[in-house]
Amino acid sequence: IFSPRASAMAPHVGDEAVAIAWARANNDLIKRCVDLYPDIFAGVCMLPQNPKTDLTASVAELRRCVEELGFIGCNLNPDPGGGHFTAPPLTDRFW
């Protein structure tokens, strides 16, 4: 399984547009690595879990990664607020 580390996802940095661009860039890079070594790696994506927005962008990125890039799952950041405790925890109904 090839995926980003949760601590490097940083969905709380910037706004929703930054989170989307960062997730897409990381997921596209993962896809390149999987394509280079398909017998070794399976892709697992990150989602733009920006704590200031709803899940629309996250659902769209998950669909893109599974349906278009062939990923087998996603890696969620358990602390989307980046330790600032200003966002609901991952266990909250919000997510």
Image (spheres, rainbow, N blue to C red):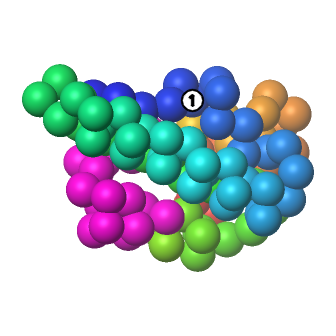
Does 46 appear above or below 17?
above
Instruction: Locate the C terminus and report the quarter of the image it occupies.
Output: bottom right
Residue at image x 84%, y 43%? 13
Residue 17, image quadrant: bottom right
Residue at image x 49%, y 64%? 61
Does 94 appear above or below 5?
below
73 inside magenta stretch = yes
Please rate how many residues cluster around mark 1, counting C-alpha atoms within 10 Å: few if below 14, some from 14 to 19, many from 20.
Answer: some
Residue at image x 64%, y 24%? 7
- The answer to whether residue 51 is left or right of residue 60 is right
Q: Position of residue 35 (x, y in %)?
A: 27, 41
- Residue 54 vs residue 62, the one in the foreground: 62
Residue 54, image quadrant: bottom right
- The answer to whether residue 32 is left or right of residue 16 is left
Q: Badge 1 is on which residue?
A: 6
- Residue 37 vs residue 20, the one in the foreground: 37
Q: Count the marks: how many? A: 1
Q: Position of residue 41 (x, y in %)?
A: 23, 29
Residue 55, image quadrant: bottom right
Q: Amino acid at mark 1?
A: Ala
Q: Is residue 7 visible?
A: yes
Magenta-colored span: 61-75
- The answer to whether residue 76 is left or right of residue 81 is left
Does 10 appear above or below 51?
above
65 inside magenta stretch = yes
Q: Is residue 91 visible?
A: no
